[in-house]
């Protein structure tokens, strides 16, 4: 049985529909990242689960119990807010303990639990401080501790790394998954950063315009994005998209691309004759020195070395710009000017131009 | 500004001094007058040099006003007590009613909410005399006229809108997420209100309460019409110093000093609250 089941949830403000028929299930101990552009309704979804907002229709079932109409204090959830929302007039200890005091636990047990979680989150030494005396990172950790301390049925994390600096963000990205796993918490984690979603989520639920477009593992989302929209959101630099129309020729399935006729795998034959968008991840485009039947001529317009990879801005003969990415930085910088390129035909993505949905290749 | 020359600084100091003298001189003068006899006060030209006397204070505190036309009984201390009682109770009632109402107006959108809030505010623009005539008629029937309860009720016209609108603004400045966090942690809305919203708003509530207290304390016309001598505050009681044998300037000055002292003390004491960290830095702004 699912630990959390969000069923056909609708929510609108005045006439604006923010969440439209949203459903999602989380298994016990699973971390699901809700990822989407800003304004897609991610935070609202979390607030609905917490009970801080009321939904228009649908239901929310927590550990087998329908909590749709229950007030927040009866739901047994833990939530870390984007702005931390620490209680400014209480010490860090009291902030963390607030999740336990409501349950009238004996003070000794509260002490013990707070100190344990504080040690885990490395804020043991600042428990006596008030929130204004804490650094952003410590505030963040205190907010997490408060959400975790009472062993919530579900942990709701609203973009907790949004307001912390880059260094801490990387640190927490590494630290959070094992921490959440060890605590055994089921977590719904909202983020706007696709790298964070991929680093932390067992699954990623992509929310665009108030609906889930795809719910899948990070690897699946990257390799087999459900739509053009999803493909665009994952990847930096983002995917190259080129309109093409695959045609069946004697030599196989081909596309007319950059002034050349290039082969694509025959498993995409269902796309033949349809207007499509060809998706090429930057790492799927290779720049070669010599021409071959698979290559197309290009002009290297710009080279940006980034240490672990080098980004190339390529211009095709028909004036289209493509971004390619090569692993590592060249010893001798790649020269600008005319060259040839080919794409890894096994790594291509094909989308229906009209619906934006991915065309899956036929299973071999 | 740090490059201001000595001359500019001196000029600034002088200007500030002039402003302070302009505003504080009347108070200083009244303070001096309260230690003078009527003869000293009315001497022409006025002088800063006189033999100080406590007779004015004595008369006020003992309640015996000696005039050239004989002894008069005055109820100044009673009036002072009435002022304290009426103002304190009015502010207390207004806080009990106004703070939860302000919270409701700040946090929830409900039908007619803005209209109700504005109606309450409009009590502040209505000329009191317009309200008083019908009010004094209404108050006859249930016996509310000339009672503390009736006066405290009418004083809500002064205190309630003030507290409601000031405190509402403070509530709106506090992120609702802080209260949400408390509720998610398992506390009821009532404890979120009493343990989070109200304490965080302490300085705001103190400021509004203080302001309301001063407005109530300074009110004149409500008590003049709706209360008899026994229930009147100092503002009305001061009329007793206009006697048949002349105006008792010395006693009036002493009465002003005595009646202004509580509000002044309160304001000085509460000043700490008013400026004390209104933004507490828990929410990244």
Image (tube, coloured by chain):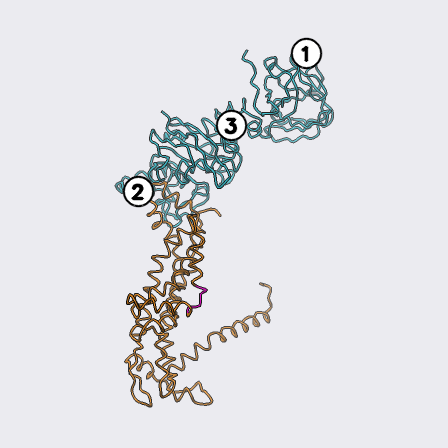
Q: Which mark is residue A213?
A: 3
In this figure, which residue is indicated by the disc labeled 1?
A249
Residue A177 falls in which quadrant of the image?
A: top left
Q: Find residue A70 and report its horizontal and vertical position in percent.
A: 35, 37
Whether discs 3 and 1 lie on one chain: the answer is: yes
Q: Residue at x 45, y 87 (%)?
A: B46
Q: Residues within 10 Å of mark 2 (few under 14, many from 20)?
A: some
Looking at marks 1 and 2 on the same chain, the residue that comes earlier in the sequence is marked by 2
The chain under label 1 reads A
Looking at marks 3 and 1 on the same chain, the residue that comes earlier in the sequence is marked by 3
Q: Find residue B80 and report its horizontal and vertical position in percent.
A: 32, 73
The chain under label 3 reads A
Can residue A179 be seen here? The reply is: no
- Seen in the picture, residue B44 relative to A147 is either above or below; the reply is below
Label 1 sits on a secondary structure element that is strand
Q: Residues within 10 Å of mark 1 (few under 14, many from 20)?
A: few
Q: Which mark is residue B257?
A: none
Q: Which chain is orange?
A: B
- Seen in the picture, residue B227 relative to A136 is either above or below; the reply is below
Chain A palette colour? cyan
Can residue A173 be seen here? The reply is: yes
Q: Nearer the viewer, residue A241 or A308?
A: A241
Q: Nearer the viewer, residue A223 or A144?
A: A223
Label 2 sits on a secondary structure element that is loop
The residue stretch that appears in magenta: B124-128
């Amino acid at each position: 049985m699912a630990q959390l089941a969000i069923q056909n949830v609708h929510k609108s403000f005045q006439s604006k529909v923010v969440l439209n028929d949203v459903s999602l299930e989380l298994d016990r101990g699973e971390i699901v990242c809700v990822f989407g552009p800003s304004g897609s309704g991610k935070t609202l979804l979390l607030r609905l689960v917490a009970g801080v907002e009321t939904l228009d229709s649908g239901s929310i079932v927590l550990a087998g119990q329908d909590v749709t109409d229950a007030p927040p204090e009866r739901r047994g959830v833990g939530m870390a807010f984007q702005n931390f929302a620490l209680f400014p007039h209480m010490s860090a200890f009291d902030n963390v303990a607030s999740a336990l005091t409501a349950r009238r636990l004996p003070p000794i047990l509260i002490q013990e639990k707070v100190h344990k979680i504080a040690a885990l989150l490395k804020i043991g030494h600042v428990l006596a401080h008030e929130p204004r005396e804490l650094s952003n990172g410590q505030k963040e950790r205190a907010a997490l501790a408060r959400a975790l301390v009472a062993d919530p049925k579900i942990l709701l994390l609203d973009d907790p790394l949004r307001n912390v600096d880059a260094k801490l963000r990387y640190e927490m990205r590494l630290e959070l998954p094992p921490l959440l796993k060890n605590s055994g918490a089921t977590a719904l984690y909202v983020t706007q950063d696709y790298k964070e979603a991929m680093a932390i989520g067992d699954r990623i639920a992509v929310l665009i315009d108030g609906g889930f477009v795809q719910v899948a593992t990070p690897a699946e989302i990257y390799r087999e994005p459900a739509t053009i929209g999803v493909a665009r959101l994952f990847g930096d630099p983002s995917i190259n998209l080129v309109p093409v129309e695959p045609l069946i020729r004697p030599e196989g399935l081909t596309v007319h691309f950059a002034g050349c006729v290039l082969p694509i795998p025959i498993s995409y034959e269902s796309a033949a004759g349809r207007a499509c968008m060809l998706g090429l991840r930057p790492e799927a485009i290779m720049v070669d020195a010599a021409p071959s039947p698979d290559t197309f001529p290009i002009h290297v317009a710009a080279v940006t070395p980034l240490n672990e990879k080098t980004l190339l801005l390529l211009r095709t003969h028909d004036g289209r710009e493509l971004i390619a990415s090569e692993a590592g930085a060249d010893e001798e910088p790649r020269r600008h000017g005319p060259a040839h390129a080919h794409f890894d035909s096994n790594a291509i993505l094909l989308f229906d131009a009209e619906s934006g949905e991915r065309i899956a290749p036929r299973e071999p | 500004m740090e490059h201001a020359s000595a001359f500019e600084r001196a000029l600034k100091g002088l200007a500030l001094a002039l402003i302070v003298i302009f505003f504080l001189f009347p108070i200083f003068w009244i303070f001096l007058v309260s230690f003078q006899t009527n003869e000293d006060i009315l001497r022409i030209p006025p002088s800063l040099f006189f033999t100080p006397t406590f007779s004015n204070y004595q008369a006020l505190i003992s309640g015996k006003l000696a005039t050239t036309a004989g002894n008069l009984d005055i109820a100044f201390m009673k009036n002072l007590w009435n002022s304290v009682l009426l103002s304190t109770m009015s502010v207390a009632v207004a806080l009990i009613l106004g703070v939860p109402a302000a919270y409701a107006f700040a946090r929830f959108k409900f039908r007619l909410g803005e209209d109700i809030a504005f109606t309450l505010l409009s009590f502040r623009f209505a000329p009191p005399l317009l309200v008083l005539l019908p009010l004094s008629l209404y108050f006859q029937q249930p016996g509310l006229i000339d009672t503390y309860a009736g006066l405290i009720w009418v004083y809500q016209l002064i205190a309630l809108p003030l507290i409601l609108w000031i405190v509402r603004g403070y509530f709106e400045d506090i992120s609702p997420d802080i209260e949400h966090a408390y509720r998610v942690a398992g506390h009821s809305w009532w404890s979120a209100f009493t343990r989070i919203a109200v304490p965080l708003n302490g300085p705001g509530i103190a400021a509004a309460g203080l302001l309301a207290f001063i407005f109530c304390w300074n009110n004149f016309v409500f008590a003049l019409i709706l209360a008899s001598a026994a229930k009147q505050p100092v503002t009305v009681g001061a009329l007793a110093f206009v006697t048949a044998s002349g105006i008792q300037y010395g006693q009036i000055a002493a009465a002003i000093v005595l009646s202004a002292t509580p509000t002044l003390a309160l304001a000085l004491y509460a000043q700490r609250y008013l400026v004390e960290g209104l933004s507490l830095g828990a929410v990244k702004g």
